Structure formats: C-alpha cells, structure tokens
Image (cartoon, helix red, strand yellow):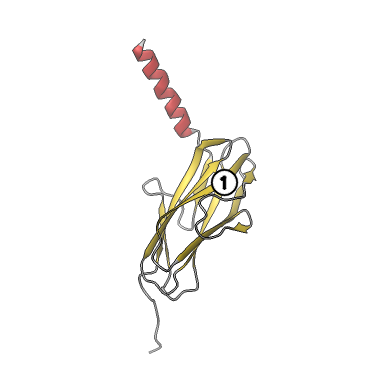
Amino acid sequence: MKKIVLFLSVIFMASAVFSQTILTQWEFGPTSFSPSITTNGAPGDTEVVSHITVQNTGPEAVTINVACVEYNIVPTAMHQFCWGGLCFAPGTDTSGVSMTLAPGEVTEEFSGHLVPNGTEGVSIAMYTFYDVDNPANFSTVIVHYNTLFSVSSEAG
C-alpha cells in the first residue's frame, strides 16, 4: 500500500511540475540553469529598465498577476514595475492589474525600472508571474540591476 501511495504522489508531483504554462523570456532567452538576468546601467542614468516577455504556452487562457520581491535595492535608488499598461508605485509587491492571455498569446507588457539616483551597486528584484486561478502555475525571473560602473567613451 505504501508503494502505491508513494507512486501516486510522485505522479501527482511530476504532473504539477510539468503542467506550468507560463513562460518568461528576455533578450537572451530563458535558461534552465539560471532564472536570472542582469540589466546594466550607470549610477547617473535616469533609469535602468528590464523588459520581460510573458507567454501562455498552455491549451487554455490564463489570467496572470505579477508579484515582486525586492531582495536588495541599493540605498537612495528607487524600484518599480509596470504590468498590463500600468506602472505601480515603488514598494508595491503585487500588481493591481491582471492580464488574461489566450493559448499561445505573448505580451511584452512587463518592465522593471530602477532609478539609481547616482548610487553605485547591484539591486536585485524577483518577479513571479502567476496564474490567478492556479498559483502553482508560475514563472519567476530574478533581475540584477547593475549600476556599479559609469561607462564613458572619449574621442581620440
């Protein structure tokens, strides 16, 4: 009996893991090795922006929300994100707007914004795109906003 319960548990967990239908992509594409990307900027930039594309790869429409966790925002810098045509105030942890994507539909309605305010450092934010009706269906991306260096070019 224990073997049957164990077997059914493994099948259930595997189906839950492989049933995720929200795919996130960025300029260099997703990798299975690391769900993180680095967006480079300079301390003097007005803002450093990361763009993430979201796709519904499943057979049914999904209503997607975004949750944000700020792991480390450099002192004096400000972070916010935009989703579904709205930008949310700094410190917002969950979007106030959901977007419904049809099967196969792709949206580029997400962007994360860091205003460095002249501060050098690496700020880290994690964005989780999840199905409102099935939170186990999600995709997470960690963004490193790198403002460690001021890049310049001199003629000659």
Number of numbered discs on residues: 1
Q: Is residue 50 visible?
A: no
| Residue drawn at 35 percent across, 14 percent down | 3
Please provide percent x and percent y for residue 145. Answer: 42, 63
In-front residue for pair 139/126 = 126
Residue placed under numbered mark 1 in the picture:
65
In-front residue for pair 38/133 = 133
Q: Is residue 29 visible?
A: yes
Query: Quadrant of the rendered structure where residue 153 is?
Result: bottom left
Identify the element where label 1 is drawn. Answer: strand
| Residue drawn at 62 percent across, 53 percent down | 84
Please provide percent x and percent y for residue 5. Answer: 39, 16
Q: Which quarter of the figure is the C terminus placed in? A: bottom left
Please provide percent x and percent y for residue 4. Answer: 38, 13
| Residue drawn at 43 percent across, 27 percent down | 13
| Left-right relation of 62 to 70 | right
Which amino acid type is marked by label 1? Answer: Asn
In-front residue for pair 36/27 = 36
